[in-house]
Structures are given as C-alpha cells and as structure tokens.
Amino acid sequence: MHPRATLAPALALSLAATALAACAGTGSTAVPATGSAPTESSTSRAQPVTVYSGRSESLVKPLLERLEQQLGIAIQVRYGDSSELAAQILEEGERTNADLFFSQDAGALGAVAAAGLLQPLEPAVVGRVTPGFADRERRWIATSARARVVAYHPAKAPEAAAFTTIDAVLDPKYRGAVGFAPTNASFHSFVTALRVAKGEEGAKTWLMTFKANAPKAYDKNTAVLDGVDRGEVALGLINHYYWHAKVAEKGAANVTAKIRFLGSDDPGALVNVAGVGVLKGSGEADDARRLLQALLSKESQQFFADTTAEYPVVPGVTGTVHALPALDSLTVANIDLNKLDSLKQTLALLTDVGLT
C-alpha cells in the first residue's frame, strides 16, 4: 500500500526562479527557536543547526524547542512554504545556510535530493521507518504521514460523505463552492499525483475543469477548513490532520465541517509525508543528523501522533488522542512518493492553467 521512494532526474534551477518569484512577498526570516536556557554544550557552539522548515511554526516549534534542550544544541529555524524553501536551497546550492531541510511533503524533498544537495543517511537510520517512507538512495526520510481528504459542510454537500474520487469536486453544482490553497506544498503534491495518475494531458484537463468551476483560493489549509466550517464553501481540499486539530481545539460539537477519506486508488487519496534531509553544504552535519534521528524517537513520533494528529512512521507508535483510522486500514493512491519530485513541471502546469 505504501508508496515506494525512487528519485527522478535532477530539478533544474529554473524552479528557483519560478517559486522564488512567488515567495518574494512572504517575509520569511530566520527565527531562532526560543526554548529554555541553552545548556553548556549549546552555548559553546560556534554555529547553531539551521533548519529550513516547511512545517508550520505553530505545529512544530514546541517539538523543536524540546529537542534543542534535550540534545544540547542551538537550533535556528527559517519557516516558510516547502516549495519556496526548496527553491531557495536550489538557488543557494552547496552554499546554503541550511543544515537540515524539514519539508511538508515528499515532492520538495525529492526536488532537492534530485539536485544532488542531500547527504546520504546511514542504513540503520533509514531502517527505522516503515518501508516505503524513505528514499531508496537514503537521501531523505519521512518523519510523519498524512492523508489527503475532502472537507465538506454536511448541510451544503451531504453527498460528499460517499465520495470515492476527487473528480467529484468538478461537478458544476459546486461552482464557486470548493476551497483550496494554491500556493501550499501539499496542493502541489496533489497536482503532481494527478500528473502521475492521469498523465500530463489528463491532469491539465482536470485542472482546467477545476478552474472553470471558480474554486475559492485561500492562503493555507487551515483557512480552507475554516471556510468550509463557516459555510463559505461546501467543499475543501486539505490534509486530514487539520480537521483533527480543529476538533481537538474546539470540541467536536463546535466543528460543523466533516472530512471524507476517499478510500480508493485515486490521487485524491494520496498519503504523503513530512520528512527531513541533511544538506551537503551543512557546516553542522553531525548535529543535524542528531536532530534528524531525534525526530524519529518514540517521543517525537508520539508528538506527531497526539499533538499534530499525523500518522507516525516508526513502527510501534500509535496515537492516544485523535480518533484516526489506522493507516494500514486505508485504501490509498498507489503512487510512488518520489514521483512527486517533478515540482518544476507541476508549477509550470499550474501557471499555464492560471491556478497559482
């Protein structure tokens, strides 16, 4: 069931120009993780471990602060969109300031790996995760998994509870009523999955039909879900954990929106991963590897399961807070994760159809 990892040819630097133009106004800056007081070992270090994180600050900052204290190393984090950060790394090459790339999705990791900018990891480290959740050439490894779902407003689109394909959102009756986050890396990976599953022309046709139905663009997945919850839109394209986090925060009785796992071999049922890789240009590679391994610890995996409502990728760890269907019980898209690395082509296609 799980996607297997093999990398495609190197991503051209033109991706950097494309994605950097998109991120010119984001204002992302290098922000130190500000946990408890540094230990003696961290205060004596010449340089911190610099993490380029496509994971949202609100999701992972508490974990990184905890690991900073436990490992006795200083951690400096630059937060941003995974696609934009991948483009930045490609532009910087081996001169990059990043020691560790913490991506929201496999596609951005694959793009950086395909450019030859990630160091190989030890086989024993890669062997710690469920098969299929690491690059076969050991250049990156997953830290958690998430499923694409359709969020729906039960009064506006009750039929969505039985959806089995993402094609259902193209119905003209949903004109102006589907929310999505066009600049988000998880949406980019979904579009890449469309390209893998349907071919270039099939994906383009799908996207043009989607655009013609006047979907509503939001800046991020949480905003998409909020739009569904308020009834601004009937449907939303998101990852599963946003809904579970909202339920945990607000209480199930206070969340109107529902989510549908499509339960089929369909690009809308993609299971993607967040993951990490150590940069070849890292001046702090040893500590970057320590941090990478710490993200695979039982404690960190429990954090992903219980705090961010994601699926752990290390066997033997199960969630205790959120009522998630077991990952191995889901029928999902049979798509090789590293076929999601053709980010350049996906961004070009989205530009071509006007969905950027």
Image: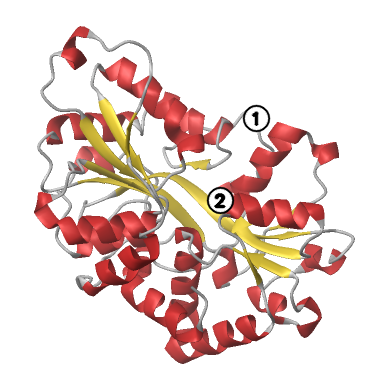
Which residue position holds label 2?
328
The percent coordinates of residue 207 (x first, y second) are 56, 82
Determine the CA span between mark 1 and mark 2. Answer: 18 Å
Question: What's the residue at 27%, 12% (across, down)?
Answer: 38
Q: Residue furthest top?
A: 40
CB within 8 Å, label 1 to label 2 = no
Kind of residue at disc 1: Val
- 330 up-or-down from 61: above or below: below
- The reply to whether residue 1 is visible in this rendering is no
Q: What numbered label is drawn on residue 321?
A: 1
Residue 164 is labelled as: none
> Vertically, is 54 above or below 265?
above
Residue 300, picture quadrant: top left
Name the residue rendered at 61%, 58% in the picture. Answer: 238
Coloring scheme used: secondary structure
Kind of residue at badge 2: Asp
Q: Nearer the viewer, mark 1 or mark 2?
A: 1
State the image coordinates of residue 128 (x, y, percent, origin top left).
Answer: 32, 38
Q: Nearer the viewer, residue 11 or 160?
A: 11
Q: State which quadrant residue 43 falls in.
A: top left
Give the image location of residue 114, x and y in percent: 21, 65
Disc with the residue nearer the chain's start (1 vs 2): 1
